[in-house]
Amino acid sequence: MRPIKHGFTKHKLYKCWINIKQRCSNKNHTSYTYYGLKGIKVCPEWNNSFINFYEWAMNNGWLDNLTIDRKDSSKDYNPENCHWITKSENSRKAALSIELGKVHWKFWRKKILTNQYGIDFG
């Protein structure tokens, strides 16, 4: 049985759909380390059907200038965990995530040094 042709292969949403699937499943994708390797998946509803993804996008605020975002970055791509945000919002969110990671590491490093060596960082 041949796949159903939908005529959307040049549409921006189709490229988005292919990209989220690739970064979650293709070990050779440049972003696989941050998605697939961490166990992030695409829900079966979207993974198996571009049309399902397209319909969700159209019904949930997609505009050409927006990018898909996972509300909880530790969870999968699925209708409940995704929404559309601007690229600048996405950049701010990424920067905040990096800064929180640094703060988290500094806290644990301080705690380890305090406990292990009796160093008080006040």
Image (cartoon, helix red, strand yellow):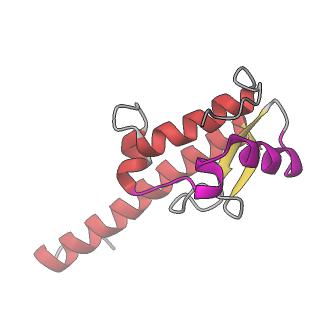
In front here: 106 or 44?
Answer: 44
Residue at 11% x, 74% y is 117
Q: Is residue 105 above or below residue 32?
A: below
Residue at 55% x, 44% y is 95
List the single residue furthest toward the top.
10
Q: Is residue 40 left or right of residue 108?
A: right
Q: Is residue 117 above or below residue 73?
A: below
Q: Report if residue 46 lies within the magenta region.
A: yes
Q: Position of residue 88 (x, y in %)?
A: 71, 36
Q: Position of residue 122 (x, y in %)?
A: 34, 74
Q: Report if residue 48 lies within the magenta region.
A: yes
Residue 33: name its quadrant.
top left
Q: Quadrant of the N terminus?
A: top right
Q: Which residues are magenta?
A: 39-62
List the single residue furthest toward the front.
1
List the single residue furthest toward the left.
117
In front here: 37 or 90?
Answer: 37
